[in-house]
Amino acid sequence: MTADRTGVVHVHSNYSHDGRDSLEQLRDFALDRGIAFIALTDHAEDFSESTWQEYVQRCGALSDSAVRLIPGLEFRFAGYRGLHLLAFGLDRWIEPRTPDEFIALAGSASRCTAVAHPILADYALPPSVRNGIDAIEVWNATYNTRYLPDPRALRLLHDIRLVRPRVVGLAGLDQHDRRNDRQTRVVLRDQAIDPVESLREGRFVNVGRTMRFDSGNGMGGIRLALLSAVRWAFDRVERAQDSVARALRSRRGAD
Ligand SMILES: [Zn+2]
Ligand SMILES: [Zn+2]
């Protein structure tokens, strides 16, 4: 049984302006799907210090031995287009204004930091982030495809790991609506007291619809080249599926 070691990361609740689900609904979602922990990453700009305190307290009240809601935030920065940084398991309110400040503050206030969907920042990271981040979201099931990880993000990870071999690759959901579960999971290698610490230390595998891969250098050169080729085709399949789904929805709406 791996259910008690299975988690999802990069999840938004309705504390985010674009999130739909209440924390209670996310707890039910986890229970329904055999998910033991949710590493939340609501948009920091939607919080004040007092809403953050309330959020942490509610996450605690909704957590038990079956499901843990782990508070965290996603930060963006003026002047750094597309660069979104995640702080998982954040234990206090922080207000970084720049990526450098994020690394300095979240490095101690959170138990694992990550670059979200590197494609949005065109894979360019400020030096402080390259030198200080714990993880790269190599599969963002919303911005990339729900079928396969992002080969360019995996290359970025390989690149960083040449200098910092402990940086890990994560499969995130970037979920804003529980009705649209894109099915990427992280499965811890051992029963963890603190799942976020296990993530930071790379004691997990990423699991998606089509593949599973290690948190570190889990994908060798040949597999990566193959992935790049297959991705091209899958992107098109997914776009076609999405447009069919949209057409069906709008027809239903018209009825
Ligand atoms: Zn984002
Ligand atoms: Zn997000």
Image: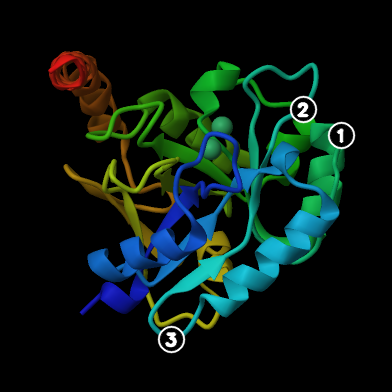
The N terminus, quarter of image:
bottom left
Q: Of marks 3 and 1, which one's residue comes earlier in the chain?
A: 3
- In the displayed structure image, the side of residue 90 where residue 146 appears, left or right: left
- Identify the mark at residue 136; answer none if there is no mark: none
Name the residue type under label 1: Arg
Q: Do the residues labelled 2 and 1 touch (CB within 8 Å)?
A: yes
Q: Are marks 2 and 3 in contact (CB under 8 Å)?
A: no
Q: Name the residue under label 3.
A: 65
Q: Where is residue 149? Give x, y as percent.
A: 33, 34
Name the residue type under label 2: Phe
Q: What element carries label 2?
A: loop
Name the residue type under label 3: Ser
Could you tell me if residue 152 is visible in this image?
A: yes
Q: Quadrant of residue 239?
A: top left
Could you tell me if residue 187 is visible in this image?
A: no
Residue at 49% over, 36% down: 158
**Relative to 55, is 156 above or below?**
above
